[in-house]
Amino acid sequence: MKGQQLRQQQMASLGRLLADFSHEMRNHLAVMQEANGLLQDILTMQGDEAPPFVASLKDTAAQIGKRVRTCADLCQQLSSMAHRADIPYASFSVNELLAELVVFLERSARSQQVTLQLELGQRICSLSSEPALLQYILYQLYVFSLDRMSKGQTMTIRTAQTGETVLISFCLAGVEKTGVTQTDWAALSAIVLPALSLLESQLEAVEQTEANELDCFEFRLLVPVDGF
């Protein structure tokens, strides 16, 4: 129990540090955006008879503004994700948690030229559990999936609810079930098993049926709505 409390305190500390960092970065980005807006106003005041390079400067300023807004959005997502660790146990939306996480997963998927899709189910109850711990499990499942995918393939993460259980499914299109060995599956289970037991959750492979793609390996995480 003391070990679990220490882990929760460590996660909370890291979450607050990341949240403080993202807030500070957003402050700097706001100043940059304000300065860039002033530059755009000055360039606009040059009128139609401005030297040719002014048009190029306007385009550059517009690109700077776009990048600053993108960075500000990423910092907001980082802050939201970091605050998940502030409170060890909380009631939260699994769809919101996944949407935050996927923002930071897309880069690694793009670098491997794998398409990452998110299909969020409707009318899913809030979970009462440890959001930071669920983030960790989902990240490990994502890494496991990406390591077994190749260029041009698609990973789809879906959410749904059955009774008092929320289902989070990973469908790896283009990856045959035979391509994931028992050793692979056992290694993944060993990594996430301690976290799964704390959340009282289960991990299972989905049997292929006529409704499933023949070249699609699918597995899912089963999380009870009330994990307390």
Image (tube, rainbow, N blue to C red):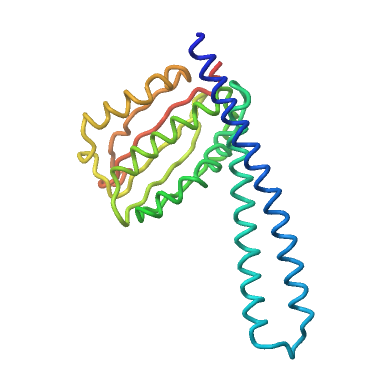
Left or right placement of residue 36 versus residue 184 in this view: right
Q: Nearer the viewer, residue 84 or 185?
A: 84
Q: Nearer the viewer, residue 27 or 195?
A: 27
Please tell me how many numbered marks the rendered image carries: 0
Task: Locate residue 138, reporting x and y percent.
Answer: 44, 34
Residue at (65%, 70%) from the top-left corner? 61
Q: In which quadrant of the rendered view does residue 38 lie?
A: bottom right
Residue at (40%, 23%) from the top-left corner? 202
Left or right placement of residue 122 versus residue 44 in this view: left
Residue at (51%, 41%) from the top-left corner? 101
Task: Locate residue 116, reporting x and y percent.
Answer: 42, 50
Q: Which residue reaches farthest top?
A: 1
Task: Locate residue 30, reporting x and y percent.
Answer: 72, 54
Task: Locate residue 203, reporting x and y percent.
Answer: 37, 27
Q: Nearer the viewer, residue 109 or 211?
A: 109
Residue at (46%, 45%) from the top-left corner? 105
Q: In which quadrant of the rendered view does residue 209 lie?
A: top left
Considering only vertical position in the picture, is 15 above or below 100? above
State which quarter of the image contains the C terminus: top right
Q: Which residue reaches farthest bottom?
A: 49
Q: Which residue reaches farthest right?
A: 45
Considering only vertical position in the picture, is 72 above or below 221? below
